[in-house]
Image: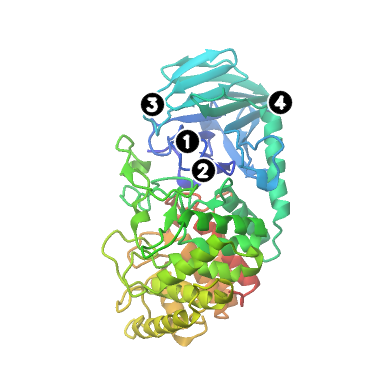
């Protein structure tokens, strides 16, 4: 089992890959080069899958406080020990000279860590245990002066250390003293085994450059609304989950962190979902500049390619890969012994009717996107045509791995897609069929309002004709299909607030074991649109306070213990916070 709770991890990102570092100074997850690359540190999923820890040697005698520097994803942790105080500042560094949107375009794949003595004398420990290929490979370590080379498989890892490291059996370690005023820099760079040699950077200046690059991103993306501190942090997390070379936003940086400890619902989230596209694009529109939304939209059009009768895939790799076939890493124990550990995600094969929701984004951002390319027009027309197949069952927003059903939220998103397509038809070219799309749109609405309502439950339910509540129906008001003030929608909001909420956190369905963060923020939006501003504000503030000390959210939160569950940090959770804060700022916007 991992030594750290999920909420104990901080995110480091260079907008190409990511690392997770625990409160006690252990980098337990790093996939150099791309978010979905094989890990070189994987202790998050197995104690023997590799880590790099720098911490006080007497770990039991101290306390740690941590924070990101100056609205960046460079992390500074201050350890208070019996002997004194020491700070560790660390980050995945930017290419020298990179600023703003250049961050991540040519990542040096370098993790820098700087140890600084603040008071007294502190004994420190460094443990370096690289295990490439998700822990399958134990590399040879070669000590050459101040550098330790790990050579095995497709990568070379070069650790440069200011203190001598003893190497044996695929690991290196040292203990050393740090006194007040002393600064020691470590840097670890990853490079292809058969390419140019690893290129080191001076750690102190590299981290300072990286903070400045993040500062420029912040300055490019001003936010003028309620809860600016929380929104800025969530916006930076979404930026950190963006693969800058393509513009794709991954759902999370981890795979197989469980929704239930010891359970089997463990999936790889290091890919980009079209399902989340509308909400992600809206969050970028609120907090970033047109370049960000345009790049993401361009990535989607390029990834989808020519659309035909087959459903558009629900997700892609960060460079647009379509085949994300799933397999298990049977040699890994999994977080908290939660197996299987999966790589890839077979949900890419599913039919999901929420994919056409991309059209909602296009209409919302029609001015910011500028003139659409022919490829973008073709994608939007193809998605509108996909939405006309709304009568077919699908796997739904929660990606049920079984027979398709008639999910109400899926139908509503088809309605929203066609409504947007009708409005966009004048700019979509000769293939646009606004009259037919409008007729299908109206048919969807009448069907949903008739068959989605359950008189006995007193609410719209998750599946047409069913009696089960499902938090996915909270998306209805956001599509514009049903107003939050409509009596039946208002009753549905109340039914979910009472029937699916535990300690204020909204579960996706009745036997869901934990609260889903994004659904809770969707309820905030619905309450705000319904005129329940005071309740909405209270729920927003209570939920925002459940982030970890760095402002990060995983997928779910246990309502009894407050423990974070599922993959982390989850883009949809942070997108949900941004959307809820903006809804509280402007309740009437769609």
Dot placed on the residue nearer the N-terminal end, 2 or 1: 2
Dot placed on the residue nearer the N-terminal end, 2 or 4: 2
To which residue does mark 4 refer? 180
Callout 4 touching callout 3 (CB < 8 Å): no
Q: Secondary structure at mark 2?
A: loop
Foreground label between 4 and 1 = 1
Q: Is residue 231 left or right of residue 375?
A: right
**Residue 333 location in percent, x, y?**
33, 38
The answer to whether residue 576 is visible is: no
Quadrant containing the C terminus is: bottom right
**Residue 317 location in percent, x, y?**
45, 48
**Residue 277 location in percent, x, y?**
51, 61
Label 1 vs label 3: CA separation? 16 Å
Label 3 vs label 2: CA separation? 24 Å
Foreground label between 1 and 3 = 3
Label 4 vs label 1: CA separation? 28 Å
To which residue does mark 1 refer? 28
Callout 3 touching callout 2 (CB < 8 Å): no
Q: Residue at x 39, y 39 (%)?
A: 45
- The local crowd at label 3, few if under 14, some if 14 to 19, many if 20 or more residues have their Cα within 10 Å, is some
The answer to whether residue 590 is visible is: yes
- The local crowd at label 4, few if under 14, some if 14 to 19, many if 20 or more residues have their Cα within 10 Å, is some
Q: Secondary structure at mark 1?
A: strand
Quadrant containing the N terminus is: top left
Dot placed on the residue nearer the N-terminal end, 3 or 2: 2
Q: Secondary structure at mark 4?
A: loop
Q: Is residue 36 above or below residue 236?
A: above
To which residue does mark 2 refer? 9
Callout 2 touching callout 1 (CB < 8 Å): yes
Label 2 vs label 4: CA separation? 27 Å
């Amino acid at each position: 089992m991992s030594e750290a709770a999920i909420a104990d991890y901080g995110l480091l990102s260079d907008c190409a890959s990511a690392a997770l570092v625990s409160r006690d100074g252990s980098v337990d997850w790093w996939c150099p080069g791309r978010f979905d690359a094989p890990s070189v540190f994987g202790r998050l999923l197995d104690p023997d899958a590799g880590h790099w820890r720098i911490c006080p040697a007497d770990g039991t005698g101290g306390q740690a406080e941590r924070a990101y520097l100056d609205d960046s994803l460079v992390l500074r942790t201050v350890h208070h020990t019996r002997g004194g105080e020491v700070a560790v500042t660390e980050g995945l560094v930017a290419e020298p000279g990179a600023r703003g949107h250049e961050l991540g375009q040519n990542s040096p794949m370098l993790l820098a860590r700087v140890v600084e003595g603040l008071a007294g004398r502190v004994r420190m420990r460094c443990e370096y245990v690289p295990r490439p290929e998700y822990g399958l490979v134990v590399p040879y370590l070669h000590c050459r002066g101040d550098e330790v080379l790990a050579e095995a498989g497709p990568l070379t890892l070069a650790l440069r250390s200011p203190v001598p490291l003893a190497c044996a059996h695929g690991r290196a370690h040292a203990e050393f003293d740090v006194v007040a005023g002393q600064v020691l820099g470590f840097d670890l760079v990853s490079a292809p085994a058969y390419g140019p040699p690893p290129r080191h950077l001076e750690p102190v200046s590299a981290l300072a450059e990286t903070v400045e690059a993040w500062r420029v991103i912040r300055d490019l993306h001003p936010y003028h609304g309620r809860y600016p501190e929380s929104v800025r942090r969530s916006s930076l997390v979404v930026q950190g989950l963006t693969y800058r070379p393509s513009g794709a936003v991954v759902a999370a940086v981890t795979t197989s962190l469980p929704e239930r400890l010891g359970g089997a619902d463990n999936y790889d989230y290091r890919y980009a979902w079209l399902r989340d596209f509308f909400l992600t694009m809206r969050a970028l529109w609120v907090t970033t500049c047109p370049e960000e939304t345009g790049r993401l939209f361009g990535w989607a059009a390029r990834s989808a390619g020519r659309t035909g009768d087959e459903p558009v895939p629900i997700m892609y790799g960060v460079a647009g890969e379509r085949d994300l076939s799933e397999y298990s890493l049977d040699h890994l124990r999994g977080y908290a012994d939660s197996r299987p550990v999966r790589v890839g995600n077979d949900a890419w094969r599913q039919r999901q009717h929420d994919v056409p929701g991309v059209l909602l984004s296009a209409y919302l951002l029609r001015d910011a996107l500028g003139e659409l390319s022919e490829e973008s027009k073709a994608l939007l027309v193809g998605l509108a045509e996909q939405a006309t197949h709304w009568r077919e069952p699908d796997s739904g927003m929660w990606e049920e791995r079984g027979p398709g059903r008639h999910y109400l939220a899926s139908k509503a998103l088809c309605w929203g897609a066609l409504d947007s397509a009708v409005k966009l038809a004048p700019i979509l070219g000769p293939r646009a069929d606004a009259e037919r799309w409008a007729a299908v749109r109206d048919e969807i609405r009448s069907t949903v309002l008739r068959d989605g309502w359950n008189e006995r439950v007193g609410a719209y339910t998750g599946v047409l004709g069913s009696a089960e509540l499902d938090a996915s129906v909270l998306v209805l008001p956001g599509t514009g299909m049903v107003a939050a003030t409509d009596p039946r929608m208002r009753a549905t909001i109340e039914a979910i607030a009472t029937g699916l909420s535990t300690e204020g956190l909204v579960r996706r369905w009745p036997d869901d074991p934990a609260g889903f963060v994004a659904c809770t923020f969707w309820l905030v939006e619905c309450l705000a649109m319904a005129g329940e501003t005071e309740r909405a504000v209270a729920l927003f503030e209570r939920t925002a306070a459940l982030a970890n000390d760095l402002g990060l959210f995983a997928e779910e939160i246990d309502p009894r213990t407050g423990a974070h569950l599922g993959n982390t940090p989850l883009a949809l959770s942070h997108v949900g916070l941004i959307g809820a804060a903006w809804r509280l700022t402007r309740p009437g916007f769609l």
